[in-house]
Amino acid sequence: MTRREAAMANFMEGYNCSQSLVLAFADMIPVDKATLSKMASSFGGGMGRLREVCGSVSGMFTVVGLLYGYDGPETGQVKADHYARIQELAHRFEETHGSIVCRELLGLSVHHDVPVPEARTSEYYKKRPCPEIIGDAAEILEEYIKENPVS
């Protein structure tokens, strides 16, 4: 199964968009899946259904932090280099989807949605582009990792 397929399958299984993306890369990260899932759980629905940054984008950023991030109170080039990675990934995602903002990707006018997620019915999946968006994010991240091997 490709990472794209794994990320999409995770979403169809019921994981939120951020969890779906992070768990598709779990084999690369020295953290157990339960912890990864909890860590990513807050970012679904554009950060807790606030409809801000897409959860799959937050998931990409989470994986990149765990693979390439720094762990001290950095202020100089190390931080700048890491932020450049994040901005590059955001740009790649925007090239495909035009935005990294959940409500814009879903065509919603609401800025802060109710906290209760919709039931995952067949109708839900028919009206949501989320699986494809998550799959695209997984492909973008996979390509980035191939271009920038983890040391």
Image (spheres, rainbow, N blue to C red):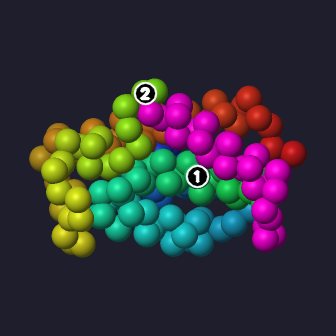
Q: Residue under circle 1?
A: 61
Which mark is first along the chain, 2 or 1?
Answer: 1
Image coords of residue 90 (percent x, y): 52, 40
Q: Secondary structure at mark 2?
A: helix
Quadrant for the C terminus in the image: top right
| Residue found 44% across the figure and 33% down from its top | 94
Q: Residues within 10 Å of mark 2 (few under 14, many from 20)?
A: few
Disc 1 marks which amino acid? Answer: Phe
Numbered range of the magenta stretch: 71-94
Whether 13 is among the magenta residues is no
Image coords of residue 16 (percent x, y): 38, 59
Q: Is residue 32 visible?
A: yes
Whether 88 is among the magenta residues is yes
Left or right of 108 on screen, residue 56: right
Label 1 and label 2: CA atoms lie apart by 17 Å
Left or right of 36 on screen, residue 78: right
On residue 131, the disc is none
Q: Secondary structure at mark 1?
A: helix
Quadrant for the N terminus in the image: top right
Q: Is residue 122 visible?
A: no
